[in-house]
Amino acid sequence: MDPYVVPLEPLRDSLKPIRRHRWKRSAIELNGRFESRYRHGISGLLMQSYSEQPNQRLGRLHIRIILMEYNAELIINRVANGMYMDLQGRIRKYVGQEMLNIMIMMLFQRHGIPKRRKTIAQGISALEFDSKGIYLASVTKLGCLTVHDFESLYCQTLEISTYVVGLEEDETRHLVHLSTDHQLDVVRWNLANQDEVACASMKSNEVLIFDVGYISSEPVEVLQKRHNVNAHKGLSDIAFTSTDDSRLFASDLCGVIHLWDRRASDLPCLELTTNSRTTLNSIQLIEENQIIFGAGKLGVIYMWDLRGGRTSAAFQSHKEVYHPLSSVKLASMLEKIEPLKAQADIISKEIHSVDIDPSSPHQLAFHLDDGWSGVLDIHNFQVTHIHCPPPAWLNVSNSSADLSYVRKPSWLPTYSIYAVGSSSDNGIHLLDFYPDSSSPCHVEYREDKKALSGDTNESKQNMFVPLSEGVTACAAHPLNGTIIAGTKVSIIPAGDFPKA
């Protein structure tokens, strides 16, 4: 058979491999995690899902949560003072005037008609989830501390049941619901002991610590500032260490951060001072609980390094006083941004809040009293992102801005998205603060450069989620990203994490 076989001539041209498009999801399938750039690419879909919440549903949630959040006595006091007219109008829309009158009369009969009193600032002043997202703690300007079971709270917002009967049922589901004799401005969970929640007031020199597993209207521990006749009363923010449940930081109205070691005394053992005697509105503890940032009325961000070559004796003597290792005047950093300087008069503004990005710990977000927000890179102390919404005075029909509130934004657990209440409108800004020039808030972001690169992805943009009230505080669920907005009257779920 060999003579009949035709031999093949050897191929002279080398075989060229077939070029195939790279499978974009290979890294995700192999590593079991999303890369940061991939997450940023789809973050626009996430923000759209927040903005597509039905307005009618949010209106109903608003009515339901108001009646749940405050006990009947507080509601009646407000109705007697001529408040909640807008709320009554919305309730009337769903249940009718007759049912509204019956509801008010039943509450009056049960609690009595209170005396008319001077209207005071009220509403949600702070919110925070525990580390697992099981419980949500909130405090109000009226002095109420409430710890909600988040799953129950969320389920109750999905439907409207009977208002008066539902009110009693809702209060029994609160893990903690109590009132103090002064306003409350901050609430924090103990990171090392999730059974404890601490709150403080700008009208009091005490930190109240409650144990949610211990049914009592009294705090399990009260920490106090050292007596100083020249010091203004009040504490503005609280920070716990993540490794030691006995150490707690609190900032005051005199430019000082106090550190308590609860094992030793109920008085501070250490002071971090700014030498300015002006209010510190916000503090953040990072880098293995050794570096702390603080910011306030002067528009300056301070940094203290608790290591600094000092011994552990610093935690045992109240005579120890730390001065800032570094400080940054934010207005000076903003002036370095040429496009911003050309369009706006940059002056020193009060800083309402500073927050570390959980997905990019080198990013320190800041929020100013005029509604501006941005990011300070703590590696080089340069402003990398900025968002400048229109000033509140342009929207004369909206009165959401209130000087009695220090707005408290929140980072989402991933995606580097910053949720902040608007200073001029009723709603929340969702800001893309991704640590790259592809972020629309980045100081080096260029729309023309994006077009030349062929990037047609229009999803990378900031979003505004309209709500029925001005937002004073935001909290993002640590696992699924659900945003809870605290307003001057209620708690509103502002959006859900997209479900598969």
Image (spheres, rainbow, N blue to C red):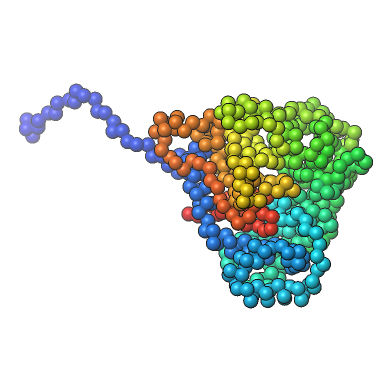
- Percent from the top left, x then y, of residue 445? 51, 32
Return the residue found at the far top.
12
The spot of residue 314 in percent (x, y) is 85, 33
**Relative depth, front residue between 345 and 423:** 345
Residue sitting at x 48%, y 54%:
500
State which quadrant residue 61 falls in: bottom right
Quadrant into which the N terminus falls: top left
Residue 107 lies, with reference to residue 189, above or below; the image says below
Residue sitting at x 85%, y 36%: 270
Against 459, residue 482 (above or below) is below
Relative vertical location of residue 474 with respect to residue 306 in this rendering, above or below: below
Q: Is residue 200 left or right of residue 438?
A: right
From where the camera sits, is residue 246 visible? no
How many marks do you count on the picture? 0
Residue 357 horizontal side relative to residue 269, left or right: left
Any part of residue 5 in sight: yes
From this view, report whether residue 60 is shown above or below residue 238.
Answer: below
Q: Nearer the viewer, residue 471 or 389?
A: 389
Q: Is residue 210 left or right of residue 369?
A: right
> Which residue is located at x 73 percent, y 32 percent?
300
Q: Position of residue 315 (x, y in %)?
A: 85, 36
Q: Position of residue 423 (x, y in %)?
A: 64, 46
Residue 386, image quadrant: top right
Residue at x 62% of width, y 36% of height = 374
